[in-house]
Image (cartoon, rainbow, N blue to C red):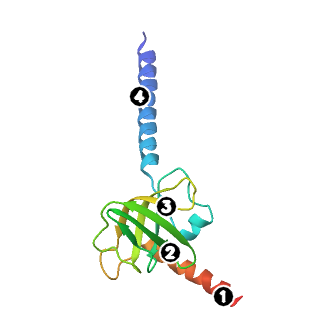
Amino acid sequence: MKPRHKRFALIIGALAVLGTAAALVLNAFEENLVFFFTPSQVVNGEAPKNRAFRIGGMVKEGSVQRDGVNVRFVVTDTANDVPVTYTGILPDLFREGKGVVAQGKLDDSGKAFKASEVLAKHDENYMPPEAQHALDKAAVEKASKTLK
């Protein structure tokens, strides 16, 4: 085999290895990518039906129901509400009327959210930026609807 052919085969082999590595990295990245949605987006059908995502907003006052480690509560952005079920121990800072982000999937009906993880705020002033933006946007939409 001529040196020219050896070099060409080496380049083709290196490109194949690089392409395979890039495909594996992108596949792993896509599987671990989790998007954030507001309750309004979930109610409007913008959230994926068979893929994990995060929902964020406020825990609606009076909505928390505990049955051992099974908990049901409602996440709201003041415009729309989404019922959430969670099995496990909630964070110590989880409270009604406070910010929360839950990760999981929609149930088979597509109307309730089954959380696999619940994250609560870490101090009195903190709220995830996405949740704060969603609450502000929902408040503006709610105010514009009441003026009509």
Name the amino acid type tagged 4: Ala
CA neighbours of label 3 inside 10 A, class few (<14), some (14 to 19), many (20+):
many
Q: Residue furthest left?
A: 92
**Element carrying mark 1:** helix
Name the amino acid type tagged 2: Thr
Q: Which residue is mark 2?
A: 76
Q: Please state, as top left, top right, bottom left or bottom right, where the N terminus lies in the image.
A: top left
Disc 1/disc 3 C-alpha distance (Å)? 28 Å
Q: Earlier in the sequence, mark 1 or mark 2?
A: 2
- What mark, if any, has residue 113 been given in the picture? 3
**Element carrying mark 2:** strand
- What mark, if any, has residue 146 been given in the picture? 1
Residue 82, position as x, y percentages in the image: 52, 68
Q: Is residue 17 above or below residue 81?
A: above
Question: Disc 4 or disc 3, which is closer to the eye?
Answer: 3
Name the amino acid type tagged 1: Thr
Q: Residue at x 45, y 56 (%)?
A: 34
Disc 2/disc 3 C-alpha distance (Å)? 12 Å
- What mark, if any, has residue 14 been given in the picture? 4
